[in-house]
Image (cartoon, grey):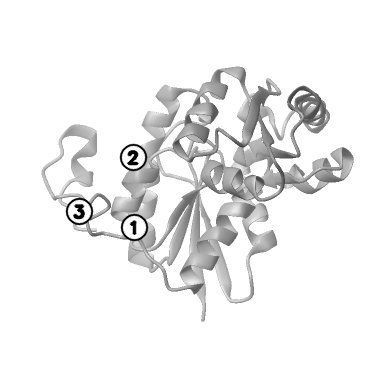
Amino acid sequence: MTVLITVINANTSEEMTRAIERGARSVAGPGTRIHAVTPKMGPAAVESHYDEALAVPGLLAAIADGERAGSAGYVIACFGDPGLDAARELATGPVLGIAEAAMHSASFLGRGFSVVTTLSRTRGRAWDLAERYGMRRFCRGVHACDIAPLELDRDPDAVKKTLAACAAALDADGSDAIVLGCAGMSDWSDQLGAELGVPVVDGVRAATLGVESLVRMGLRIGTRDEYAPPPPKPYSGLLRDFGGREG
C-alpha cells in the first residue's frame, strides 16, 4: 500500500519547506511518499496573528490541490496550527497540526513538557493550543529563543541560542521533555536531544507519523456534522476561487 502524505509549510519560504521535508521524510515508513508544499500565496513567515490569518487561504488551496492529487492525509507544518478546522472540512483523509501532534507525543514521555518557540509574541498562541488540546496539565511553560523564523537557517548561532533556551526552560519548569515550537527547527531535534539528555519532540515528525498511522488504520475525517464539507456559496474579490467547493 502506497500512502501519499502532503506536508504543507504555512509560509512561502522554500528554505523552510525543504527543512520540513527532510524532517517528514526521515520518519516516513516504507511505501509512504512525502510531498512537501510551499503555498502559492501567503506571508514569508508566520510570526503574528495577522500572518496566521493570511496564511490560511494559501494553505487551504494546497489542501484542495492535494485532494485532486489523491493525497491520503496532510500535515500543517506551522506551530500555530493555522486553518486546522477548515482543512479538516476540506480534506478527506486525516489532517494533523504539528503543535497538536508534538504536544500529545510529549505527554507520553513524562509528567510535563516545555515548549521552546521562536519569538516571544507567539507564546500566547502556544498556550491557547495547549488549552485547546487538553495539554495544559502537561505543558509547564512556553519559552522563546527570540530568533525570527526566517533567521533559523541564517543565524550561525541559532542552534546554540535554542539549546540555551531549552536548557533554561528545563531548569525553570522542571519538565521532562522539550517541544520545539517551530517547523523550521525540525532538523535540530536529534542534536538538541543528545545535548540536553531529554526527549526533544519535533512536531513535523510527530505529525507525519500520526497521519501515516491513521491512514494505515483506514481512518478518515468524520463528516457527520461539524467537519462535513463546507456548504458551497459564492465568494468575492480575492477569494472568488474559494467558493463552490464540494469537498
What's under tag 1, amino acid-wise? Ala
Within 10 angstroms of label 2, few (less than 14), some, or many (20 or more) residues? many
Residue identified by numbered label 2? 57
What's under tag 3, amino acid-wise? Arg
Residue 184 falls in which quadrant of the image? Answer: top right
Residue 220 in the image: state x and y as whole percent: 37, 65
SS for dot 1:
loop
Which residue is pictured at 43% across the width and 30% down the height? 52
Within 10 angstroms of label 1, few (less than 14), some, or many (20 or more) residues? many
Asked whether, in this view, residue 182 is left or right of residue 55, the answer is right
What's under tag 2, amino acid-wise? Pro
Which residue is pictured at 63% across the width and 53% down the height? 205
Residue 94 in the image: state x and y as whole percent: 42, 59
Asked whether, in this view, residue 184 is left or right of residue 237, the answer is right
Residue 85 in the image: state x and y as whole percent: 35, 44
Residue 83 falls in which quadrant of the image? Answer: top left
Task: Say which label, 1 or 3, has the lower sequence index.
Answer: 1
Q: Is residue 67 above or below residue 14?
A: below
Residue identified by numbered label 3? 245
Task: Say which label, 1 or 2, has the lower sequence index.
Answer: 2
The dot on residue 91 is: 1
Which residue is pictured at 65% across the width and 26% down the height? 141
SS for dot 3:
loop
Real-space Cα distance between discs 1 and 2?
Answer: 14 Å
**Quadrant including the C terminus:** bottom left
Look at discs 1 and 2 and give the one toward the viewer: 1
Q: Is residue 29 above or below residue 24?
A: below
Residue 124 in the image: state x and y as whole percent: 52, 22
Q: Is residue 193 visible?
A: yes
> Of all residues shown, which one is farthest toward the bottom?
1
